[in-house]
Amino acid sequence: MSNFEDKLNKWVDRTYRYVPDTIDLSRTVIHMLDVQNLCLDKRGADYVQSVGGAPSGEETLVQAKKVLDAARAKNLKINWSMWGMDPNGYDIGLWGEKYPAWKEPDSPFNHGTFDGALCDGFVPEEGEAVLRKHRNSSFFETPFNSWLQQDDCEYLVIVGSSTGNCVPTTTRDGFEKGYKVIVVADSGTAIPLNSHGRNPDYDHEVPEGYGQYWEGLRNIQAQYGDVLSTREFLELMERSSQ
């Protein structure tokens, strides 16, 4: 058991689960959710550092790549999402009132920027659909649900960030549409409370086991999905392929 799994078992009650010992891989879809430079590349404008024991953005990329490579090796269905705003501000909505700087044409939160691009080493292959979205959930005003229906999805596996925003909203929407959602916990992280992209004057310490990341995972496990480590999910795939 890894140090991360020790933390996961300590801070997330995983008593109640719906994922069995093996799953039907032909009905499993890997969703590479927002693996983008904004939060996960050290050069990103909103780069996530390790806070409260959560993984840093850079650390999540190692785990996300393991899942992606293993899924491709087993010919699992894979699709991608990319979060961001239209540079013209057509779709910013209430975010423009909460964060006025996001309305600027050169905002790092826009599609078509370095921050909006997928991280190095994460390139969709032929046959892997990619959607652009402008809200947290991958289901909001996108063809995502149609894709999953077409793929006869039973298990929706979420790999990526942010565990405080896009992961829980996509998980909740997926659960309510009847998908059994698995969140690969250490393949994503969450924007900490003291993110420099949010409030540079907020510098309170976040104790171990607290913060958006862990609260997001606790809520997901309690209500909408099953939370696994990368190692646990890779072992699940291996057992299921026998």
Image (cartoon, rainbow, N blue to C red):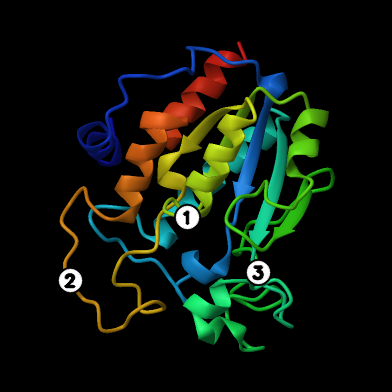
2 relative position to 184: left or right: left
**Residue in view at x 35 percent, y 73 percent:** 195
Q: How many numbered circles does the render carry?
A: 3
Q: Secondary structure at mark 3?
A: loop
Q: In the rendered image of this protein, does residue 143 appear above or below residue 134?
A: above
Which residue has dot 2 on it?
204
Amino acid marked by disc 1: Asn
**Residue in view at x 66 percent, y 22 percent:** 154
- Numbered tag placed on residue 198 in the rendering: none
Camera-nearest label, 3 or 1: 1
Which residue has dot 3 on it?
117
110 relative position to 220: left or right: right
Q: Position of residue 123 (x, y in %)?
A: 70, 56
Closer to the N terminus: mark 2 or mark 3?
A: 3
> Crowding at label 1, few (<14), some or many (≥20) Cα neighbours within 10 Å?
some
Q: Secondary structure at mark 1?
A: loop
Q: Secondary structure at mark 2?
A: loop
Between 86 and 189, the one nearer to me in the picture = 86
Residue 158 seen from this side: no
